[in-house]
Amino acid sequence: MPLRVVVAGATGVVGRTLLPLLRERGHHVTALARKADRLEELSVDEITAVDLLDLDALRIQLRRTAPDVVVDQSSAFGAADPQEALQRMAKLRERGTKNLMDAAVAAGARRFIAQGMTAAYRPHGHDVLEEDSPLWVDAPGRWGDLVRALASVEEDLLSRSGIEGVSLRYGSLYGPDTHYAPGGDVHARVVGSELPLVGDGVGLTSFTHVDDAAGVLLELLEGGDPGAYNVVDNEPAESSEWLPAYARMAGAPAPVALTMEQAKSQLDWLTVHQLTEQRGASNFRLRETLGWKPTWPSWREGFASLFGLWPG
């Protein structure tokens, strides 16, 4: 059945992948983004520029649109400084996403789908973590601010009456136009030998191709129970495994190796954490609930496709 769908963050990497899929299914799509000039390229029914921090404007827009489902894919990771990006993202989640939820409820929307991330889980041993694992709300610095904001949004979303809340916890997003694509930040760091192997390289990363993020969103517009879902591939990978493989596919030099002491003096805290302590996530709940299978079951094939090394 065709739905009226509002997509915030419509010009992001997931939003741009999602929009044509929504139109193919016959849904009426309203795209929201902060800058109007970036909306003109989108093929949607309605486009509008609105700041998620402006609750009054959101209420007016959603009341007029009368959506069945509101999807929040907004992001602030475009900031050049990583610490500024974390600060902006925490503010966007704590205020912007909650404003959008308030407006969605007031407009009578049936379901709200928010964006989370598996990197927010508290590290625990060598476990691959499921959705009931705790978020790292006492993490240090700006990272802790962001995780606390995500946790607050999820608690609000999943406990609200009058609307079905879904939180999609993505792994590291990759695919066209992401940080992992040629010209992206991760690609530049690897090519420039600026992303090293640290210690034993046992930090786990779960990856999510943008095709799979958009595909799950499409299925959860109507199907699936409310709740939190890890949207990740089948193969969490240690940094000692994925980083050298990525470098080879990119035609980059092999990553240099640093001791933990060297890394702490040369790299920011978050990068060291991701390479050495971060835990991966399981997609079992999503597979059991929706019968979902990722289009890209392993980052190996997905990375290869980025560099034209995968058949088809």
Image (cartoon, rainbow, N blue to C red):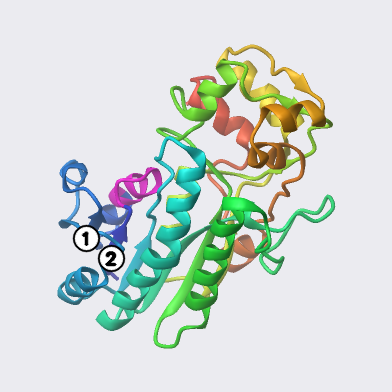
Residue plotted at (27% across, 64% down): 6
From this view, report whether residue 83 is shown above or below residue 141. Answer: above
- On screen, residue 202 versus residue 81, left or right, reads right
| Nearest the eye: 238 or 266 | 266
Q: Position of residue 258 (x, y in %)?
A: 78, 23
From this view, report whether residue 94 is shown above or below residue 191. Answer: below
Q: Quadrant of residue 197?
A: top right
Q: Which residues are magenta?
A: 10-20
Q: Position of residue 192 (x, y in %)?
A: 57, 15
Dominant secondary structure (helix, strand or loop) of the stretch shown in magenta: helix
| Nearest the eye: 123 or 226 | 123
| Nearest the eye: 3 or 15 | 15
Q: Determine the CA span between mark 1 and mark 2.
A: 6 Å
Q: Position of residue 91 (x, y in %)?
A: 43, 59
- On screen, residue 50 versus residue 189, left or right, reads left
Mark 1 and 2 residues: CB-CB less than 8 Å, in contact?
Answer: yes
Residue plotted at (33% across, 69% down): 100
Residue 311 can be seen, yes or no: no
Residue plotted at (30% across, 46% down): 11
From this view, report whether residue 206 is shown above or below residue 247. Answer: below
Residue designated by label 1? 30
Residue plotted at (73% across, 42% down): 204
Residue designated by label 2? 5
- On screen, residue 21 versus residue 194, left or right, reads left
In the image, what residue type sits under mark 1?
Answer: Thr
